[in-house]
Image: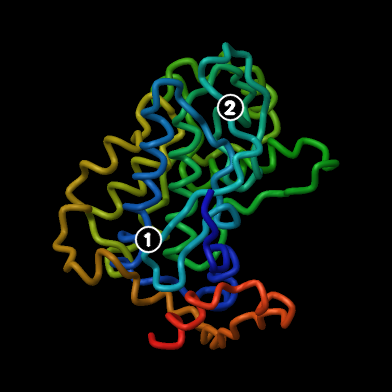
């Protein structure tokens, strides 16, 4: 892919400091580009699933005009038949993957994009579980981080939930009593408009059959908000320091003295008259 002279979205958010969110208009502009990139991947003849979309794998150009998804090291093609293994950074992995589902699809990417959206709005990682690869029951810890905010699914909200490989184990270890979705409490209307919240909630839906696809999300009214030409091309809040390009002085190579004798006299005289 082409070079993008900019830090990752992760680095940019961390440089702003914890708890320093982006404006909703800025988040909307970035989300439009992210979802458009995901749609491009998912709509190919051979569907490509990234499986590790996160702020560290998103590059943002100096003026915000470019938003690039990078690092396709864990990507798979849906031309490969399942089972698929668990992959990705735990904080951004979809619940069906954490529960051991081996026949997942491109909707794991839109879950990750929902996590990125929430992080841009708060300045913090939304589902902060345990990223220690050697930790026991790491998936359970991550699921607890998700369910205590979104509510623990059941067969009514997610048909087939109880038949997933790790559901029985998870329900035995997870604390009871978390049935209600508290996402709106974390993103009140003064922080995120109703239309913006509908997109966020649609992306962060545990049941993948009800989760927004990239195509469906891009059709939402949230993205129909007026976007001036300058705002659509640039994300003003992303003010990266710009380095002044060094001036390069061109010095023509000196012609070796011995080559002067090989120039025909007529050519030399013509050159002097120019």
On screen, residue 62 versus residue 95, left or right, reads left
Q: Earlier in the sequence, mark 2 or mark 1?
A: 2
Vertically, is 138 above or below 194? above
Give neighbour class at mark 2: few <14, some 14-19, many 20+ (Cα, 10 Å): some
- The residue at the point 43 percent across, 28 percent down is 207
Q: Residue furthest front?
A: 265
Q: Quadrant of residue 236?
A: bottom left
**Which label number is shown at residue 187?**
1
Residue at 45% of width from left, 21% of height from top?
Answer: 46
Q: Secondary structure at mark 2?
A: strand
Q: Which residue is mark 2?
A: 76
| Residue 162 coordinates in the image, percent (x, y) | 55, 17
Q: Quadrant of the C terminus?
A: bottom left
Q: Residue 204, image x and y in percent?
A: 42, 42
The residue that appears at 65% across and 44% down in the rendered structure is: 89
Q: Residue 110's quadrant in the figure?
A: top left
**Distance CA(mark 2)–CA(mark 1):** 33 Å
160 over 142 or under it: above or below: above
Q: How is colour applied across the structure in the image?
A: rainbow
């Amino acid at each position: 892919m082409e070079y993008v002279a900019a830090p990752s979205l992760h680095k940019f958010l961390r440089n702003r400091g914890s708890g320093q969110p982006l404006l909703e208009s800025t988040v909307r502009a970035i989300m439009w580009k992210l979802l458009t990139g995901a749609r491009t991947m998912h709509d190919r003849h051979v569907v490509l699933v990234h499986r590790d979309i996160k702020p560290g794998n998103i590059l943002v150009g100096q003026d915000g005009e470019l938003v690039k998804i990078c690092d396709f090291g864990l990507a798979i093609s849906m031309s490969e038949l399942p089972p698929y293994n668990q992959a990705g950074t735990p904080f951004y992995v979809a619940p069906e993957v954490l529960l051991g589902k081996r026949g997942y699809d491109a909707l794991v990417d839109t879950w990750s994009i929902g996590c990125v959206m929430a992080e841009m709005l708060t300045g913090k990682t939304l589902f902060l579980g345990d990223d220690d690869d050697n930790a026991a029951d790491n998936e359970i810890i991550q699921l607890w981080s998700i369910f205590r905010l979104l509510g623990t699914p059941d067969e009514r909200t997610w048909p087939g939930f109880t038949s997933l490989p790790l559901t029985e184990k998870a329900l035995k270890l997870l604390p009871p009593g978390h049935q209600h979705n508290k996402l709106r409490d974390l993103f009140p209307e003064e922080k995120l408009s109703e239309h913006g919240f509908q997109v966020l909630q649609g992306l962060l839906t545990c049941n993948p059959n009800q989760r927004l696809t990239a195509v469906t999300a891009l059709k939402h009214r949230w993205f129909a908000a007026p976007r001036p030409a300058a705002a659509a091309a640039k994300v003003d809040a992303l003010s990266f320091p710009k380095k002044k390009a060094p001036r390069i002085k061109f010095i023509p190579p000196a012609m070796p003295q011995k080559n002067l004798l090989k120039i025909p006299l007529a050519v030399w005289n013509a050159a002097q008259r120019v």
